[in-house]
Amino acid sequence: MTWLEFFWRSEARRYTYWHVVPGVLVVHRARLLACARAGLLMLWGADICAETPKVLKIGSSGGLSGGSSSNEEAALKTLKVFIKEETGLDNDIIRQKNWRELADKMAKRKLHVGVFHGDEFAWATQKYPELKPLALAVNIDRYPVGHVVTRRDNKAKTVADLSGATLTMASSAPHFLRTFLNQVGGKNPEEFFSKVKLQENVEDALDDVVDGVVQAAAVDRASLLAFKRRKPGRFKQLKDVAHSDPFPPVVIAYYDKVLDEALLRRFKVGLLGAILKEKGRTMLTLFRLTAMQDVPEDFPKVLARTQKAYPPPSKDER
């Protein structure tokens, strides 16, 4: 009986332990099973189909916290500690030039995990279908919506009527808002509007519209509804000129068969349970998130709709 035949027939395969193949390699039983079943194990010089790295390399397509550089640094530090506690692995979080570079490095196995803005993930999966979502990073709305609003007495009926106007938005505005503005304006916002003024927060931006300081504001729906709750009188002085289709949220993604399945499960469980732990809640707050969520069944439909309605820009703007 060969060692492989013994492996498959052994009663001990019900348990988790290490198999030593004399003179060849040391492999974990569960991983060997998965690889052998997939037809990916090459005998006498085996290539393991997924790995448990010593250092988990995580790439991002840009800033993750949406705040200042000091806030970003604090958020990343907390995230690294949280991942270490949940996976037992040291980790590096490496900001990439853009989503294209991030997806390419993941496909080349230079990065184990990637964090994409939702619209970017939709674009990346068109070229790299083996990119898979592990969890969603959500701020109130699972599928956020963007709005362009003006004062109620503004004569603009569509975004086209705002060409050459002054637009404001929060400096921490989510990425998908710019994608939405590109689509409704037909060009880069800085080219379509006479000026794009960044405010410290959404409330200040909407107050500027009400006070006539600027003509329009771009804002996500969750923030707009929060403004309605805090300042109902001022909210009534606003009107919606345009709103987007629902976008996918930020996606924590992996490339198929790059990481060991047990590690992926452990990582996912840790992410989904972040809200239950003090350090996890701190991490979420620093990244302006309310929860990490499992990937729902309708997620592929939202990706497909985003790909159709909001094609990727010819070049990356930030």
Image (spheres, rainbow, N blue to C red):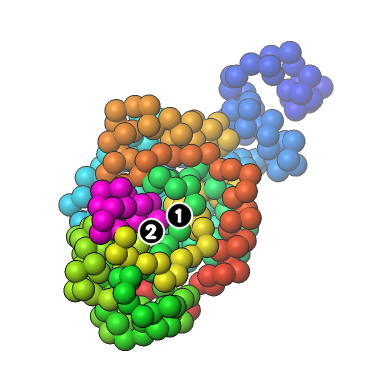
Split into 4 quadrants, where in the image is the C terminus?
bottom left
Q: How many marks?
A: 2
Horizontally, is 276 left or right of 26 in the view?
Answer: left
User: Residue 173, can we see it?
Assistant: no
In magenta segment, residue 20: no
Q: Residue at x 75, y 42 (%)?
A: 39
Residue 285, by quadrant, is top left
* 2 and 1 marks in contact (CB < 8 Å): yes
Q: Residue at x 62, y 53 (%)?
A: 300
In the image, what residue type sits under mark 2?
Answer: Asp
- Which residue is farthest right? 1
Q: Residue at x 30, y 58 (%)?
A: 235
In magenta segment, residue 231: yes
Per the image, the residue denoted by label 1 is 144
Q: Which residues are magenta?
A: 220-235
User: Which secondary structure lies at badge 1?
Assistant: loop
Per the image, the residue denoted by label 2 is 220
Foreground residue, 23 or 167? 167
Residue 189, by quadrant, is bottom left
In the image, what residue type sits under mark 1?
Answer: Pro
Rendering coords of residue 207 (x, y %): 21, 63
Rendering coords of residue 254 (x, y %): 52, 48
**Secondary structure of the magenta portion, mostly?**
helix
Residue 308, by quadrant, is bottom right
Q: Residues within 10 Å of mark 1 (few under 14, many from 20)?
A: many
Rendering coords of residue 105 (x, y %): 48, 59
Q: Residue at x 49, y 62 (%)?
A: 119
Q: Earlier in the sequence, mark 2 or mark 1?
A: 1
